[in-house]
Image (tube, rainbow, N blue to C red):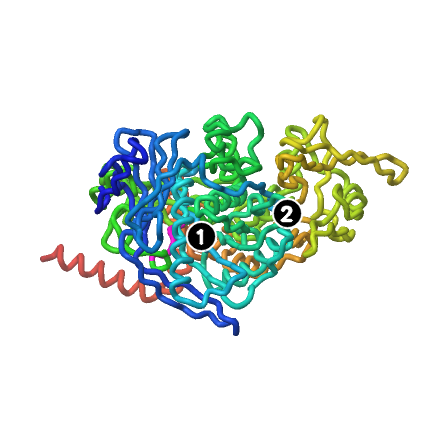
Amino acid sequence: LLSEPLPDLSNKSNLISNRSIHHTEETILYFCRAFLLMKDGDNVSKSFLFQDHCFYHGHVRKHPDSWVALRTCSGFRGLISLNSSDTYYLEPISSVDPVYHSLLSTMKLPIKGGSCYHTHHTTQPNLISNLLSSFHSRVSLPEISDYEKTKARIMEIANYVDKFYRALNIRVPLIGLEVWTERDQCIITEEPNATLWSFLQWRQKLKSRKKHDNAQLLTGVTFKGTTIGMAPLEGMCSLENSGGINDHSELSIGAAATMAHEIGHNFGMSHDHDSCCVEATADQGGCVMAAATGHPFPRVFSYCSKRDLDRYFQKGGGMCLYNIPNMNNLVGGKKCGNGFVEDGEECDCGEPDVRTTLLHRNSACAHCDSLKQAGTMCRRPAGACDLPEYCTGASPYCPANVYLLDGSSCQYGMAYCYNGMCLTHEQQCLQLWGYGAQPAHDVCFEDVNAAGNDFGNCGKDEYGTYVKCKKSDAKCGKIQCHSAATKPKGTNAVSIDTTIKTGGTEVKCRGTYVYSTQDGQGDLPDPGLVMTGTKCGEGKVCRDRRCQNASFTELETCLARCHNNGVCNSNGNCHCNQGWAPPFCEKPGLGGSVDSGPVQYGSDIIAMILQHWVFHLCLLFPFLMASSYVQGLRVASLNVNGCRDANKK
């Protein structure tokens, strides 16, 4: 139970009674180091000390479908959901004297409505996305109390987002926060497209000094139209596209709903169409991935979103999510039950009624409190660019996830691996149009994308204006396909058919256009832009909407060490073929890498390795005999004489 009972709110509602909320998991928050970016550009590290045990996840007694996400310091603030239709927002009436509280139905919350725009540049259990949030405001925050309030607000938002994603077996821990006090570190304007791409470029620099999986910008600037957020589709884990921008919203839960939506786009979730959201009615807020924000706020994912997520993982997306974050970077501290294994714990399942940190019987490399045998496969490859991992025999957990190094050949040489995925124009045509779709002739890309309009372009510039594609960049603009389908997949998407004459013949090209509607439902992603990382020429990939030379120096250096008997993983180490041993695949062995755990194969593979050694020993034996003939003869004579002497005795 919570360390203190809830204040008596019986006069507000008889649904929430004293001491009725179970604490099941504590969202970690003890001590945080945040970075305040000052006017001179220096990062000033400030330590904020918060009261212990501030943020909780839990449920309400006698309500099996309930969940709770509360902040308990400086009064109670958060959500109490009894079921899909009854959810309440609890908050102090006064921040000065947080003794008295109000309990409002979320139907009455003044949440700003709006829509999302996401761009198309790019259900495994227990995945973790390390979130780093940047807070931007037009108002300077000079006082430490303001910093603390900002910090607490971000933590409340992160607590809600983490709770939403737990339903998908995904954890979203906050591992960093930057508050921009004097000047913006990227372009932030009313134009969401320009703001997004500027923020993502800034994030690339941030990645080098602060390791994280995904970054989200929370801003006080109001975007044009009804847009309240924007994020690239399938951008999770990529250097260029793993992030989003969000309207700050007056209520933390409103900002959390937007942020959960934008992160969903990074996970490959498209907007829900009309028949998707059966989990919650419009009056109940609808689903998280609706194109327009519902009222009250959405808090559940539709079956369509879960399907999109599963497809994203199946083709190798989200490779970074399999690795546990550095515990020292988590915003918070140690706690049994937070779902993260820390010093002194063998495991931490993070389930309701956590009583122990002993081995969980469903751990990937443990069964019934016993470690599985070394070499047992614990993570199968997900897609053509992934690699398997094996139990070490010394830990209940699977080794960190590794995959083929960027630039590795895939799809029979037609594509390159990028962030663990094999991206091709053909794959994107199939995703857009369905079975039988193929990329159109190159002339389609060159002609249509040279227009620089809604139907053919290489994205938008910082002013929101469509960019004409150069001929060399044409295959990184709007994708052109051949298909017998009547229209592209998805709502509000229509076919743009073009016929081009080339070499005396007519070539048909099919592109896509997403139109807008007054209710915001048309504010959908542009599914036609070629994804970042797609091969656009020999040694070239699409990046920043241009066909750029790809530097594969690291890959070439690594492959030179593997003696043509293996491939290179994302850590730059050799992953050896069967029959060769790591680290350099030059000696007989079982295969695998120093990162993936020991490989275990059947007796036929072991026999092959033994035959390999016997063969080489047989070749070597005559040379050894010849080089040591005289000395060997002498030793043999002595041995014979010794045996004879012994026989005589």
Which structural element holds mark 2?
A: loop
Q: Residue furthest left?
A: 649
**Residue at the image point whose x is 49% and y is 52% from the top:** 214
Which stretch is magenta? 323-327
Q: Disc 2, disc 1: CB below 8 Å?
A: no
Determine crowd level at label 2: few under 14, some 14-19, many 20+ residues with C-alpha closer than 10 A.
many
In this view, the residue in front, 45 or 72, is: 72
Residue 408 percent coordinates (x, y): 57, 50
- Secondary structure of the residue carrying numbered label 1: strand
Q: Quadrant of the C terminus?
A: bottom left
In the rendered image, residue 449, in percent from the top left (x then y), is placed at 77, 46
Residue 116 in which image quadrant = top right
- Residue located 75% across and 53% down the image: 472
The residue tagged 1 is: 131
* Quadrant in the picture for residue 498: top right
Does label 2 or label 1 sit earlier along the sequence?
1
Residue that carries the numbered disc 2 in the rendered image: 534
Could you say where residue 148 lies in the image, as x and y percent from the top left? Answer: 38, 60
Left or right of residue 461: residue 237: left
Residue 276 forms part of the magenta stretch: no
Task: In this rendered view, identify the residue nearer to me: 430 or 197.
Answer: 197
- Any part of residue 447 in sight: yes
Which of discs 2 and 1 lies nearer the camera? The answer is 1
Depicted 212 relative to depicted 600: above or below: below
* Image position, residue 6 (x, y; %): 25, 42
Mark 1, other Cα within 10 Å: few <14 / some 14–19 / many ≥20:
many
x 59%, y 59%: residue:
201
- Hey, which quadrant is residue 344 in on the image? bottom left
Quarter of the picture containing the N terminus is top left
Magenta: predominant secondary structure element? loop
